[in-house]
Image (cartoon, grey):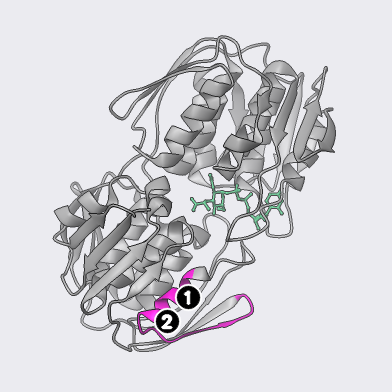
Amino acid sequence: MDSLLIEGGRPLNGVVQISGAKNAVLPIMAATLLTRERCVIRNVPDLEDVRTMAQILRTMGAAVQQGEGTLAMQAASVSDKADYELVRKMRGSICVLGPLLGRLRRATVSIPGGCVIGMRPIDLHLKGMRALGAKVQMQSGYVRVRGAKLAGAPIFLGGRAGPTVLGTANVIMAAVLAEGQTTIENAACEPEVADLARFLNAMGAKVSGAGGPTVTVIGVKELHGAEHEIIPDRIEAATYAIAGVATRGVVTLAGARLDHLAAVVDKLREMGVKVESHAGGITFQRGRSLRPVDITTQPFPGFPTDMQAQMLALLTLVPGISIITERIFEARFTHAAELVRLGADVAIEGPSAIVKGGSPLSGAQVMASDLRASAALVIAGLVAKGITQVNRIYHLDRGYERMDDKLRSLGARVKREPGS
Ligand code: EPZ
């Protein structure tokens, strides 16, 4: 497994081009199963998760050609099964459930396991399928949904932690070919859901209100092929912004959308970071000294859980006490112990991390555990004195396009070490 060797202490300066959003492209790839016609998707990031999803769709019978930043996809015929071996590689593949039910009226999908950040249940996905008239059975690790007739219905999709992003995506994708109107209340408002709806409407669906808490779908008979450009990745963007601030550099995000970054920009400004949006992008510059802040992760438009680890890494550098409370996932602090190995002072109290910021970080070997925790360790390594070796960086490759190249282009001294 590859590692990343980072020589800390160098400021990041310059412009970084933000890639297409991982969490938009994955459900949109699944949505191409809803038509037998050809679809072309552009601004596709070059990520492990995209390659995995392409592999899953190929095993289900879809034709998938990957070009430079593009995907040409056609599911002329498709099987109703997504098997364990593939689904376990990437939980996000659960988003084939909705399109399979919509197109074939049946699906057998392996129940995605949990992961380091939590249980990752799918009860709300299944509540939505049942509401549309499908029969749902759990059998030997698979969920089987059957719905000869799918009829639109009112569905409340709020769960113990609020809305569900992929649950909302799955229910929309099952409803677009159901008979009649579906109204989803407490739908996830993430921009990636709105991007999926734009693609579905380009295919001839009738989805309105996506990106807001109430989404309405009027079922149609069939969908046709379409072309689509993926929105920029707001989490990648915020990650580089925080890396620039942490290393006392000036970083400009080219291609990022300020309206997708409101909560992160708000917190960085509260800390004393200057944020300016201009024709060339969005520039982040640290002020003279940074102030500690308190953060609670929330569903969009609140502070994103996918930025919690990266912000925690930054706050370890800010003198004073900061508190980060994780309200979306039950176990998303695996990065804290690794940050402590680099010299940070972090204590976990239930759903909160209490950070006594300001102690200097020094390089060490650390272990990546999930995608965003890995990014947090890279940010800390860019600041820590000496060399930090981040092991198991396949986690990073799942969701960050060529992160080592992008960091080097900003002046970082990073080297990818092939794994033993
Ligand atoms: C999506 O996961 C993202 N992944 C995650 O990004 C992101 O952290 C998450 O949304 C929250 O924003 C993709 O889009 C591929 P959820 P998803 O269903 O949809 C509970 C990353 O780093 N819940 O919105 O699987 C669940 O336990 C990844 O890019 C239920 O209770 O997350 C969690 O507490 C990590 N029942 C909360 O809802 C359900 O049926 C939010 O989960 C479904 C979810």
Task: Give x and y (percent) for residue 399.
Answer: 41, 47
Residue type indicated by callout 2? Val
Can you tell which quarter of the image residue 76 is in?
top right
For the residue pair 150 and 152, the one nearer the viewer reads as: 150
Q: In this view, does 159 lie to the left or right of 290?
A: right
Q: Residue at x 53, y 47 (%)?
A: 190
Q: Which residue is drawn at 54% across and 34% down?
A: 27
- Please tell me whether residue 124 is drawn above or below residue 376 in the rendered image: above
Residue contact at pointers 2 and 1, CB within 8 angstroms: yes
Is label 2 in a helix, a strand or a loop? Answer: helix
Task: Give x and y (percent) for residue 253.
Answer: 25, 52
Q: Is residue 183 left or right of residue 251?
A: right
Q: Can residue 211 be seen in this view?
A: yes
* Label 2 environment density (alpha carbons within 10 Å; few <14, some 14–19, many ≥20): some
Determine if the magenta segment contains residue 349: yes
Q: Residue 119 carries which label?
A: none
Determine if the magenta segment contains residue 82: no
- Please tell me whether residue 32 is drawn above or below residue 137 in the rendered image: above
For the residue pair 276 and 368, the one nearer the viewer reads as: 368
Residue that carries the numbered disc 2 in the rendered image: 340
Q: Is residue 165 left or right of residue 372?
A: right
The residue lying furthest to the front in this view is 420
For the residue pair 45 and 187, the one nearer the viewer reads as: 45
Is label 1 in a helix, a strand or a loop? Answer: helix
Residue that carries the numbered disc 1 in the rendered image: 336
Task: Give x and y (percent) for residue 10.
Answer: 15, 70
The C terminus - image quarter: bottom left
- Give the extent of the magenta segment: 335-351
Residue type indicated by callout 1? Ala
Task: Give x and y (percent) for residue 261.
Answer: 40, 55
